[in-house]
Amino acid sequence: MNTLAPRITLLLGFASFLFTLWISPSESLYHHFVLGPSLMLLFGALAAIQERRSFDQTTSIRICQLYCHASELQAANDAST
């Protein structure tokens, strides 16, 4: 349904990683190897959650549409008998 939100979240994660490299080019290795990848993993997890929600919403909408169509067919079948 909406795949833009997970993509934006992943881009924010990558941007935060680049930001940690930019603010501390000569700082400790903590920023490069712990903080940056941790932020990327966090934003990646948020993107996966957003993707799952959009999938669930799409699936539930399709199930409701199928149920409505089935009930219409049942009503038409009952009316014809």
Image (cartoon, grey):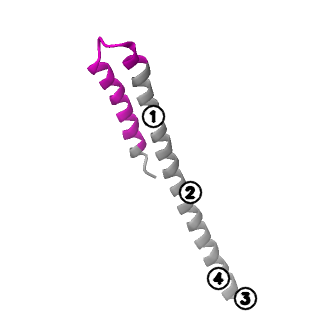
Q: Quadrant of residue 4?
A: top left
Residue in the picture at 59% in, 63% down: 63
Please identify the quadrant where the C terminus is shown: bottom right
Q: Where does residue 74 sit, x and y in percent of width and height? A: 67, 79
For marks 1 and 3 on the same chain, the one whose residue lies earlier in the sequence: 1
Q: Nearer the viewer, mark 1 or mark 3?
A: 1
Crowd around label 4: few <14 · some 14–19 · many ≥20 (10 Å): few
Residue 75 versus residue 30 in the image, above or below:
below
For marks 3 and 2 on the same chain, the one whose residue lies earlier in the sequence: 2
Residue in the picture at 40% in, 35% down: 10
Q: Which residue is mark 2?
A: 59
Kind of element beneath mark 2: helix
Compute the Cα span from label 1 to label 3.
59 Å
Q: Amino acid at mark 2?
A: Thr
Q: Which residue is mark 1?
A: 42
Q: Amino acid at mark 3?
A: Thr
Residue 9 versus residue 75 in the image, above or below:
above
For marks 4 and 1 on the same chain, the one whose residue lies earlier in the sequence: 1
Compute the Cα span from label 3 to label 2.
33 Å
Q: Amino acid at mark 4?
A: Ala
Kind of element beneath mark 4: helix
For marks 1 and 2 on the same chain, the one whose residue lies earlier in the sequence: 1
Residue in the picture at 29% in, 14% down: 25
For marks 2 and 4 on the same chain, the one whose residue lies earlier in the sequence: 2
Q: Which residue is mark 4?
A: 75
Kind of element beneath mark 1: helix
Residues 67 and 80: in front is 67
Q: Which residue is mark 3?
A: 81
Give the residues in magenta: 6-33
